[in-house]
Structures are given as structure tokens and as C-alpha cells.
Amino acid sequence: MESLCDIFLGSSHKILFPNKIRVITAVLYVVKLMEHVKQTIRRLLKETLTVAQKLPVAKRRQFIRQSLDNIHDYCATFEKTFIVCELIVTCDQYDLGGCQHHSATLFRGPNEDASVAICVTEQGSLLHRNDSPWTIYCDAGDVKPAQSVLMAAGVRG
């Protein structure tokens, strides 16, 4: 079976740089593979949010949880770490701009200051952030982040 080096460089590379070429090729392959995995994770998260905003409020949280579990399993096949913490918070935390009497489920990484997060409020609002202000996918009127982007205008929980 031909290696990538054989295909791109022909067999003469084996005489000049047999081990260096293989190492460089392997490193390039891993870099491209990890970039592909990151792009797939982004796509899966976007698809998850798009589908979740169309679900009834009662099913939203469970769908998000299951989708994140599926992404975790996908990452495990590439030995990539994908850790999700699920926290019950109040809507006045994490710059959500809501009331302390309303609760929400926050899905984020293990870091307390994680910049990537998904939030589903008990009333049905659905929000996502990724190194930016919250993006509102579904607005049930229970949160008002100071800085936010509305993904689907007029969509209510």
C-alpha cells in the first residue's frame, strides 16, 4: 500500500529523507484530522441548536443533553477530550439578564469561566455563546442578556 509521501513525492523521497518525511506526513495528517474534528463539532452544535429551537419546551433540555453525549462519543473515537458539565443556575447568573427566581440548565466545559456554553431555561429560552455574547435561539421572555444576537426573530418557547 502506498503512503501519502509516495503519492505526493514519489518513491525517491525514501532514499533522501525516509523517517523525516514519514514524521512530517503523520503530523500533517493529525493536524488536518483534528481540524476536521473541530469543524464537525461546530457543525453538530449548530445542528443541535437549530433542531432544539423547534422542539417543545419540555423536550429541549433532554435533546441538548443527548446531542452533547453523542458529540462526546464522537470525540472519544479520535481521543479528543470533550467534557460537558451540566449545572442548574438562576437566570440572573452568567450574564443571562434574567430573574433569580427563574432557573436554567447551563451546559459548559469544566472551566468555571468557559466561553462556550448552551443554556436552556425552565421557561424554554435557548441560548448559546462561543467567545461572544449570547446568541438567542429561542426567546421565552425570561432572560435579557445585555449583549446578545437573536438567531430566529419572533421564535418563542
Image (tube, helix red, strand yellow):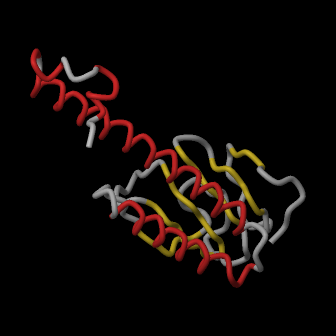
Decide if residue 57 is on the left or right side of residue 74.
right
Which corner quadrant of the image does residue 22 belong to?
top left
> Vertical placement of 3 versus 143: above or below?
above
- The structure residue drawn at horizontal position 27% and vertical position 21%, both measured from the top left corner, is 10
**Image position, residue 125 (x, y; %):** 72, 67
- The structure residue drawn at horizontal position 82% and vertical position 54%, both measured from the top left corner, is 152
**Image position, residue 43 (x, y; %):** 59, 52
- The structure residue drawn at horizontal position 79% and vertical position 70%, both measured from the top left corner, is 54
**Image position, residue 69 (x, y; %):** 46, 72
- The extreme bottom residue here reads 58
- The extreme right residue here reads 154
Q: In the depicted view, which residue is nearer to us: 142 or 156?
A: 156
Which corner quadrant of the image does residue 23 belong to?
top left
> Vertical placement of 96 versus 36: above or below?
below
- The structure residue drawn at horizontal position 72% and vertical position 73%, both measured from the top left corner, is 124
Which corner quadrant of the image does residue 99 belong to?
bottom right
Q: How many marks?
A: 0
